[in-house]
Amino acid sequence: MKRIMKHSLIAAILSMTLLISSAGIPLMAAQNPAESQVGSEGRISSKEEVVYGSLDNSGKIKSIYVVNILNVTEPGIVYDHGSYSSVKNLTDTGELVSENGKVKINASGGRFYYQGNIDNGDLPWIIDISYYLNDVKTDPKDLAGANGHLRIEIDTGKNNSIDPGFFDNYLLQVSLQLDTGNFSNIDAKGATLANAGENKIITFTVLPGTEGKLSVEADATDLEMGSIEFSAIPFSMQIEMPDMSEMTDDLSVLTDAIAQLKTGVTALEKGLAEISGGASAIVGGSSEFKNGLSALDSR
């Protein structure tokens, strides 16, 4: 019996932190006296959110949801903004009310988590995944238990219907794991490869503002594989500059030497000009001397 290929190619994880205030301000306090009787006004210091997308085998979006994290400094009623088809409390059993692009929360103190589901959502990247078995493009549902040479091509590009700030400023990491019991001769140009037990972890990095054309090849036996994961994180790079003092000192010496060389060249040019003038005078004197000899011979 064929082993079932795990082809729920999950994931696009987009992380970003939204700092609302470092001092702690209310997220829209209760709006009317009736609401204010339900609970006291709460306060939060900051908010974070993580966007999760579940993709099908080819990279098309199946579903998107957001996990919101509120850092609550004073328990009570707060409102968060977000247009969700449904919401789920991930912290306690309290009810959440979502309407008109706002979520009403009776939040306990500390970190409060809730999930918001989005219908017909989109991501900043367009992802396309293709599979080839022995160089023949193959539907992934037909790959379970197959034997042969497998090639997976992953293309990532800009989604023009989404704010370009994410595509232009977020680093995209693409990773997958291949069990070395099922795969051999693994080749993934441009990727970082690591071992985790019997699994080979393959990680690609796509820089902000660039499109990715990624490829993984391997010889498969009784083909079975897990999910492909896409993670997007704000790009930052910390580079410690080396001590340049010795180099700048050497450059100063070089600059001084070049200045001295220029002065010497100028003096040389002046000397050559004087030599040229002296040579011209000698030629003139020689001509006069020759003329004098000729006059003497004619007598």
Image: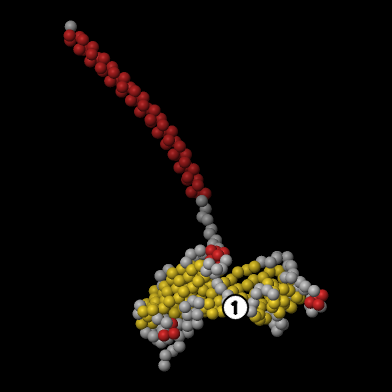
Judged left or right of residue 228, residue 268 is left
> Residue pushed farthest bottom?
1
* Residue 289 coordinates in the image, percent (x, y): 25, 14
Seen as rendered, the residue at the extreme left is 298
Q: Nearer the viewer, residue 186 or 122?
A: 122
Residue 85 occupies quadrant: bottom right
Q: Residue at x 74, y 78 (%)?
A: 106
Element under disc 1? loop
Camera-side residue: 265 or 163?
163
Which residue is found at the position 73% from the left and 67% from the top? 24
Q: Amino acid at mark 1?
A: Asp
Q: Residue at x 26, y 18 (%)?
A: 286
Determine which residue is flagged by label 1.
Answer: 119
Examine the rendered structure and indicate whether residue 168 appears above or below residue 249: below
Measuring from the top left, give residue 152's x and y in whole percent. Answer: 42, 76
Residue pictured at 52% horizontal, 78% vertical: 55
Quarter holding the C terminus is top left
Q: Relative to 229, say whether 266 is above or below.
A: above
- Residue 205 visible in the current orientation: no
Q: Which picture quadrant has residue 37? A: bottom right
Residue 249 spot, x, y in % from top left: 50, 45
- Mark yes or no: residue 50 visible: yes
Count of number-bearing discs: 1
Circle 1 residues within 10 Å: few <14, some 14–19, many ≥20: few
Q: Quadrant of the N terminus?
A: bottom left
Render colour scheme = secondary structure
Q: Is residue 176 left or right of residue 147?
A: right
